[in-house]
Image (cartoon, rainbow, N blue to C red):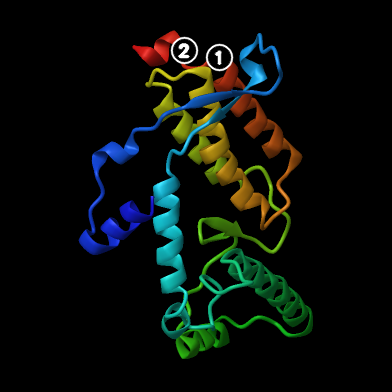
Amino acid sequence: MVEAVGEFFRTGKLLKQINNTLLALIPKVNMPTYVSDYRPISCCNVLYKAITKIMVKRIQRVLPLLINYSQNAFVPGRSIADNILLAQDYLLVLKLILLRAKSSYPAVQQQRQQLLDCVGFQEGSLPIKYLGIPLSSSRLTIADCRPLLDKVDTRLAGWNHQTLSYAGRLQLIKSVISTLHTYWASVFILPKGVLKMLERKMRTFLWQGPSERDKQ
């Protein structure tokens, strides 16, 4: 293993045979009778993990010199989702300011246009999309979550034309669909109706798979 890692950093190449792996089944009990009585063991991707960790350790030394700390991505302890939360707070404060202004002073179209020309902003309406997620001054509705549902439908439609096993469908749900849902849920509280629709879509794809019409 050490020689293989050193050879990669010297030449920058990896043999295709490294992708081959030997899967061994270690019995969990003294007299195994079922497949569940075995524990699968393999060294697949161990070499890739070792090389990746070494590269990450080296890059960590220079990353602080390349990253601007005024943003949140690639900074320890911060997340790119913090930008969305901050923008959401700005929208809530801005809504309060606008409501107070409307209740105190009449809105003048000419003054508003002068302000837009001064700051260089474009006038728009909520909700707006930021980092792939709609921003609004109120709680998300099912209509606001339509981009998420459409994206899930697009992914499922593409997979329906493939011949996938139960394990393959389960892996796609865990690695792709659940990731989309988690990204949205890490920022907003999704409506119950959206959660039920996502669960129904994933359940149907998992247990039924592609229909005969989709296979044709």
Q: Secondary structure at mark 1?
A: helix
Tell me the number on the disc at residue 102. Answer: none
| Residue that mark 2 sits on | 211
Residue located 67% across and 55% down the image: 186
- Numbered label tally: 2
Can see residue 144? no
Is 1 positioned to the left or the right of 100 in the image?
left
Location of residue 66 with respect to 124 vertically, above or below: below
Q: CA distance from mark 1 to mark 2?
A: 7 Å
Q: Which image quadrant is residue 146 in?
A: top right
Query: Which of the two residues, 60 or 28, is positioned nearer the viewer here?
Result: 28
Q: Which residue corresponds to the image point at 59% horizontal and 62% vertical from the top-left? A: 126
Q: Amino acid at mark 1?
A: Gln
Left or right placement of residue 130 versus residue 196 in this view: left
**Secondary structure at numbered mark 2:** loop
- Between 97 and 59, the residue placed more toward the observer is 59
In the rendered image, which residue does mark 1 sit on?
208
- Residue 15 percent coordinates (x, y): 24, 44
Answer above or below: position of 54 versus 147. Answer: below
Residue at image coords 54%, 83%: 70
Circle 2: residue type? Ser
Q: Position of residue 14 (x, y in %)?
A: 26, 49
Image quarter where the C terminus lies is top left
Residue at left 42%, top 43%? 45
- Could you tell me if the residues under marks 1 and 2 are in contact, i.e. CB atoms within 8 Å? yes
